[in-house]
Image: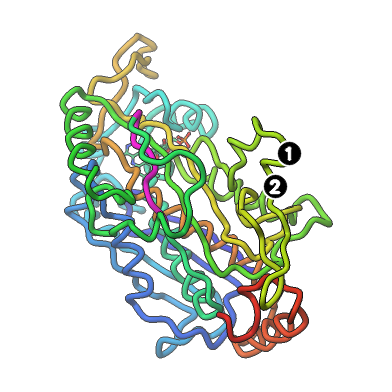
Amino acid sequence: MLRLVTGGESHGPELVAILLGVPAGLPLTPEDINRELARRQHGFGRGGRQKIEKDQVEVRGGLRGGVTLGSPLVLAIPNRDFAHWAKVMDPWEVDEEAAQRRRIVTPRPGHADLAGAWKFDHRQDLRNVLERASARETAARVAAGAVCKALLGRFGVVFRSGVLALGEKVLASGPPTFELLAQVRDDSPLRTPFPAAEGELVAYVEEAKHRGETLGGVVGVVARGVPPGLGSYTHWEDRLDGQLAQAVMAVPAVKGVVLGAGLEAAGRLGSQAHDPILPGVHGLRRGSNHAGGLEGGVTNGEDVVVRAFMKPIATLRNPLPSVNLHTLQGEPAAYERSDVTAIAALGVIVENVVAFVLARAFLAKFAGDHLRDVQAAFASYQQRLVGWGPEGFAPGKR
Ligand SMILES: Cc1cc2nc3c(=O)[nH]c(=O)nc-3n(C[C@H](O)[C@H](O)[C@H](O)COP(=O)(O)O)c2cc1C
């Protein structure tokens, strides 16, 4: 069973991802991981921090000579800004004066600050909450997702993502196709499939920033080449639709997850909502993909299509009312350097958490201690479906 644990604070020494259950024999390069980390840091509307820090992975275990050993894969991402924060965030000894200057006591609405203070008794300093609640932690999830992508890539699975809406500017409604998201350029300011529209969007972000406002939006992710039969209808916890929703919803600020045409399908007639099964040349094919690649909680060989809806960033330069937890008097919420929007990064993060969930289901089905065992299990399944599997799954088609 593939498992992921992350640790580390936003301004602490480093973030760590520990990935258990990666088979031995998987070749990895630093670029496999650093490329995804760089994609996550990109995007117009991010705060100054992305310019200070260029994330680079350091492997602390589970890899030898660029090949996985089957032992826990330990990935560290040092926080390059730690040098400036050591007095405040040192694990053993903090400088009281410096910590006092950075202390936060007025919780920000929309953040974990207040609920976290109640829960863990952090009333004295909400930094004890926000340092871990910060979406900086998603760098660790992305590093792990990059390994999952490298594994799935060996079996023909590829990913695309992009921004479909920014604030009230809707660029594309409905579930995105792989072809639409293939138009996204990673180096474009907002990672939309419509580069020509991005000038206007950049101005929209600038205007929001000028007004002390923040923006959310919608991203789409498509995974192509996912084999049929991942997940299960036999037990609720094994349903892959539920697992995908959980993992994507667990990304900070994501408040809605939709698979395929789920949102729109609710208002359609049944005949317009489902996907005809048709005879094909190398097996079966589907007339459409409203289901977004999953039926009964099981992948059906079509593209897996996910959308994530992000609320606007919670830290506001013109803060909402809050209460000072020491004096219990009304005060504006705390402000600390923050993004105006992180929508461009969200697509990359969702891509990588989807990769983790798919890789976990993939390794549950094609289990093996060494990559060769996984390949043999995969080939045997492919053989079993010859002639009646999804067209694209036939041997030689991938
Ligand atoms: C990539 C990314 C970057 C984010 N950057 C910020 C930020 O700079 N400031 C902020 O207040 N929230 C930011 N957020 C959102 C908060 O982390 C999130 O709203 C908060 O942890 C509360 O969790 P919840 O919104 O899921 O309830 C970001 C989220 C993501 C995915």
Q: Is residue 243 left or right of residue 45?
A: right
Q: Is residue 353 left or right of residue 8?
A: right
Q: Inspect the image, locate mark 1, and give the three-letter code of the amino acid beneath it.
A: Gly
Answer with the quadrant where ligand 1 appears in the image: top left
| SS at mark 2 in the image | loop
Taking the image as drawn, is residue 93 in sight?
A: no
Location of mark 1 (residue): 270
Q: Is residue 317 left or right of residue 391?
A: left
Location of mark 2 (residue): 274
Taking the image as drawn, is residue 134 in sight?
A: yes
Residue 202 sits in quarter: top left
Q: Residue at x 35, y 13 (%)?
A: 327
Q: Residue at x 18, y 28 (%)?
A: 207
| SS at mark 1 in the image | helix
Residue 370 sits in quarter: bottom right
Q: Residues within 10 Å of mark 1 (few under 14, many from 20)?
A: few
Q: Are marks 1 and 2 in contact (CB under 8 Å)?
A: yes
Magenta-span inclusion, residue 166: yes
Can you say whether 194 is above or below 302 in the image?
Answer: above
The image position of residue 194, as x and y in percent, is 29, 48
> Which residue is at the front of the view, 122 or 238?
238
Can you say whether 308 is above or below 386 in the image?
Answer: above
Which segment is the magenta one?
161-168
Residue 311 sits in quarter: top left
